[in-house]
Image (spheres, rainbow, N blue to C red):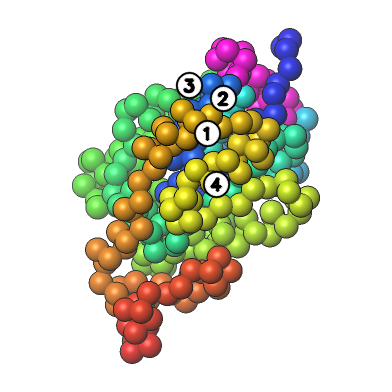
Amino acid sequence: MSGELKPPIILFGNFRSGTTMLQKLISTHPDVVPLYEPVGLWLYADPGRSHDEFDENDATEKVKRYIRNEFLKYQQQHGNRIIVEKTPHNILRIPYVRAIFPEAHFLYIVRNPLSFVSSVELKWQRPAGGKRILRRAKSTPVTQLHHYLKRFLNQQWNNRILRRKYLSIWGPRYEGIQEDLKTQDLITVIARQWSRSSAKAERDLAHFEDGQVLRLRYEDFVQDPISDMQRIFAHCGLQMTNDMAKSIKEMVKTDRNLKWQRFDPEYLAQIIPELRDEMERHSYEIPAEIAQATATS
């Protein structure tokens, strides 16, 4: 395929951690176009794998060539603008993504795991809608659609026919999640989806050169989005205009950090051992009511 692929902007971050928000904000720049979660495309190396952990060895020349060509095709179809891409599953595939796009501008965002747990627990109850299914199917290689279709039909059967409260699986599939689902409470599995993804991301990001990845915390970002967006655009070699700054201020919401309070503190106290080390790494404190419940349990 003729033409040159511009270095894409790739967002790493767990599910429900602000990657969608960041992608929309970055896309306010006229030279940028969003590519929304091409899940099937990233699975090109091994679509039948039971987990989402891929590494640089999975990025064969065939895989690199195919995925880069698909990015280039999308770029050319959208005015030759820079692609900003986010697929939360890629928090478990950082070396793989880096091997395919070593020239990319990388961002990494982290969010308080209690907010993650609350939001993701609701997502486990909702099968994907038709719009999302069609969008993802378009980015899935035709020869691999049957893998995606199998997972989709399984979810529909589990939720709509069997009327089970929760899907069979949702979110980042760390290695071993299927076994954990058989032996652990779902809330524990969800906590591990955050903590194991966070720990793996830190190990993988340690191999990047200084300045290659711009790190953000969701809670800090929503308090001062203009300052952080200036950092993001500078990191990506772009400039932010006054009109963009105005739009960004209107788009960012600051009222979504305490939704975990819908759970009883004693219920959340049981997962603190799963979360504690990574919470400390990212300077997240255990709320007093949960800490008290943890001490008395």
Indicate the position of residue 171 as horizontal and vertical percent values: 44, 48
State if disc 2 and disc 1 touch (CB < 8 Å): yes
Visible residue check, residue 113:
yes
For the residue labelled by badge 1, is the local secondary structure a helix, a strand or a loop? helix
How far is mark 1 from mark 3, CA to CA?
A: 23 Å
Decide which of 33, 192 is in the foreground and name it.
33
Q: Which residue is mark 4?
A: 228
Residue occupying the point 48% across, 21% down: 138
10 Å crowding of disc 2: few (<14), some (14-19), many (20+): many
Q: Marks 1 and 4: in contact by CB < 8 Å? A: no
Q: Residues within 10 Å of mark 1 (few under 14, many from 20)?
A: many
**Residue type for callout 4:** Asp
Instruction: Tell me the number on the disc at residue 138.
Output: 3
Give the residue number, with chain letter if any, for mark 2. Answer: 32
Q: CA distance from mark 4 to mark 1?
A: 11 Å
Kind of residue sitting beneath label 2: Val
Residue extending furthest toward the top? 2
